[in-house]
Amino acid sequence: MLPEPNEYGQTMGARYEQQIEARARRFRRPSYLRVVVTRACPMHCPFCHHEGVGGNDGAVFGAGRSRPGFADWHCMLDVAARAGIRKFKFLGGEPLLEGALPALIAGVKSACLEADVSVITSGAVPVEMLEACFAAGLDRANLSIHGWTWEAFRANGGTVQYAQRRAVLERLLVLGRPLKLNFVYLGEASEQDLGVFLKDLSGERFTSRPVTVSILDDLGNAEMSPETIREVLRRLLGEPREKWVDDDPSSLPAERWRWRSGLTVEIKSSILGELAPWVVCETCPKRKQCREGTFALRLEPSGDVRFCMDRPDLRFSLLEACRADPGRAVDRWEAELCAMANTRPVVPPAMA
Ligand code: SF4
């Protein structure tokens, strides 16, 4: 049987099909956008990686350009949805300090109802803001555990926010929405705190609810790796009863371990540098340290879209594209993405 004609009206040869398959295997089109709405945060955690935004934003790349206002944010998120983003995560800083967040979430949901919208919060904010976000369409919350016990929270620079964090956690449990608790393991100093955290999370109050526990290694510590986390978990809880890997179409796969109590822990064990999603990855000097467990684009407070956390030079201004011509901004997004991933249409072989 003859193969179907391709989009060019030509019949594809076997070699052409193989080329397309190989490219599709190598390049997963990003459908995940991390939106850094603010860099302000009431916490000062030693392990914060600031999403790679650091002190560069504005000072170097955004110099001379006015900051995005609400209409700009609305336009940029709308363009992202039209460009195929289906997973939006708002973060910071502390995203719940941004008063316009509920309106931005409502805008994303009206642009794309099926979009998965989540937030990463320290919980060091009034619980009413979180409730306003859920009312606007927020699907899930990720709560960063900056120390589970009061002593560990204080050691990480927290003070009165501990009571707010508890109130936010209680409210999230009552709401019964999917919740992820992120704990960053910092080495021996945080092992006791992690032990108490895991013991508490093994109780029915948590295991009977849609709560995911994620234990992360400190990205800023080159000595640590996912294997460090596995060793610590074995030390604290023994061998799990089950282990499996879940694929995530928007991110790298997640390894999950489950114990008899029902506690399930997620470990981000894949390494972005191995996936090497961009053309420049092949010669990238940062590739060895490129470990973050996500394959996401980042929209910065400056209005720039960044292609990875470790290379501030890989970016384009979505804000400028939106201000120049909102109707064509999605074309600019597409062109930038294709250039980074070298996804120009594969030229079909000459037909006999
Ligand atoms: S730092 Fe960025 S460009 Fe470099 S290997 Fe990692 S994903 Fe690729």
Image: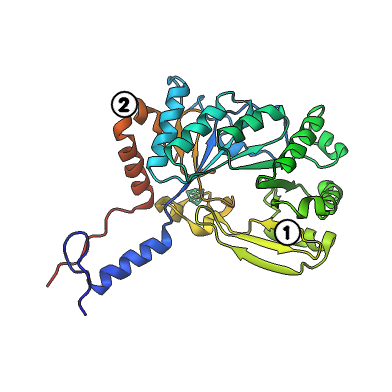
Nearer the observer: mark 1 or 2; the answer is 1
What's the residue at 37%, 66% (across, down)? 22
Closer to us: 5 or 15 = 5
Residue 251 bears which disc, if any? none
Residue located beneath label 2 in the image: 324
Which of pointers 1 and 2 lies earlier in the amino acid sequence?
A: 1
Residue located beneath label 1 in the image: 264
What's the residue at 82%, 47% (across, down)? 190
Q: Is residue 347 left or right of residue 316?
A: left
* Viewport quadrant of the N terminus: bottom left
Say whether residue 84 is visible: yes
Q: Amino acid at mark 1?
A: Thr
Q: Residue 261 placed where, x, y %?
A: 81, 62
Q: Farthest bottom residue?
A: 1
Closer to us: 291 or 67 = 67
Q: Is residue 210 left or right of residue 51?
A: right
